[in-house]
Image (spheres, coloured by chain):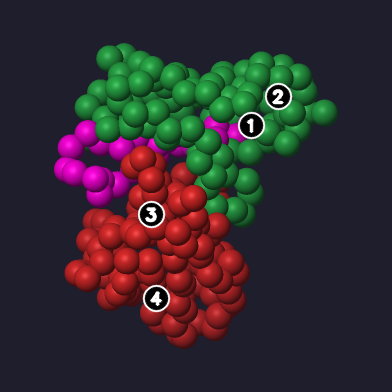
Chain colours: A green, B red
Amino acid sequence: KQEVTQIPAALSVPEGENLVLNCSFTDSAIYNLQWFRQDPGKGLTSLLLIQSSQREQTSGRLNASLDKSSGRSTLYIAASQPGDSATYLCAVRPGYGGATNKLIFGTGTLLAVQP
Amino acid sequence: GAVVSQHPSRVICKSGTSVKIECRSLDFQATTMFWYRQFPKQSLMLMATSNEGSKATYEQGVEKDKFLINHASLTLSTLTVTSAHPEDSSFYICSAAGNTYGYTFGSGTRLTVV
């Protein structure tokens, strides 16, 4: 059974710092991995999607890496800003069962960037 | 592209009444949509998988007679909370598979049962 864990559960940093959020999964047979952001009381916004054949994806100040063999993904945020404050969730799509597989979510990291 | 619209964003209803939540894929067709429930400060809990033209698949422990799901078209899935009770108060979010096999989520519905 696939389990997804995120460390740390909460993180507080001063504005301008670079930071890394970690996601680990127990079964390396994944189709892809997706990082989301959730603001309080809102839905999820997709940040980056990494296919199983890829090792990293970049979008602006965000960089996500994937190491399937070790069951790890990291989300790197450069030059953090107060507007980055949110909960960050990683989700794994299993690599079996076709295109309709359900996502398995991590527990989330609550990020607070202090001005 | 790959936008999912969810309505309403907030709803307050009386105990014993039913509430319908809509989830629409605006610029793509979604044969499969997913419904999640989220409790405060917790991650998303998958409730059911909604399949266009067929019955939904419910996760273990989710009452299918209480949470009715209808997926009558390729762009619309609805979740109806029947005979709502205060313990049904929660944040409900839908999602659909967008392009390149990533998932797109709706903005969520805050349900409060009084």
Cα–Cα gap, marks 1 and 4: 33 Å
- The x and y percentages for residue B73 are 31, 71
- Give the total of numbered labels: 4
Looking at the image, which residue sits at the far right? A115
Q: Residues within 10 Å of mark 4 (few under 14, many from 20)?
A: some
Kind of residue at disc 3: Ala
- Dot 1 alpha-carbon crowd within 10 angstroms: few under 14, some 14 to 19, many 20 or more: many
Label 4 is found on which chain of the structure?
A: B
Q: Please tell me whether mark 4 sits on a helix, a strand or a loop.
A: strand
The residue closer to the viewer here, A38 or B97, is: B97
**The residue under label 2 is which amino acid type?**
Ser
* Of marks 3 and 2, the one in the foreground: 3
The image quarter containing residue A72 is top left
**For numbered disc 3, what is the local secondary structure?**
strand
Distance between the Cα atoms at labels 3 and 2? Answer: 30 Å
Q: Which mark is residue A80?
A: 2
Have a look at marks 3 and 4 and say if they share a chain: yes
**Foreground tag (1 vs 3):** 3
Name the residue that disc number 3 marks: B96
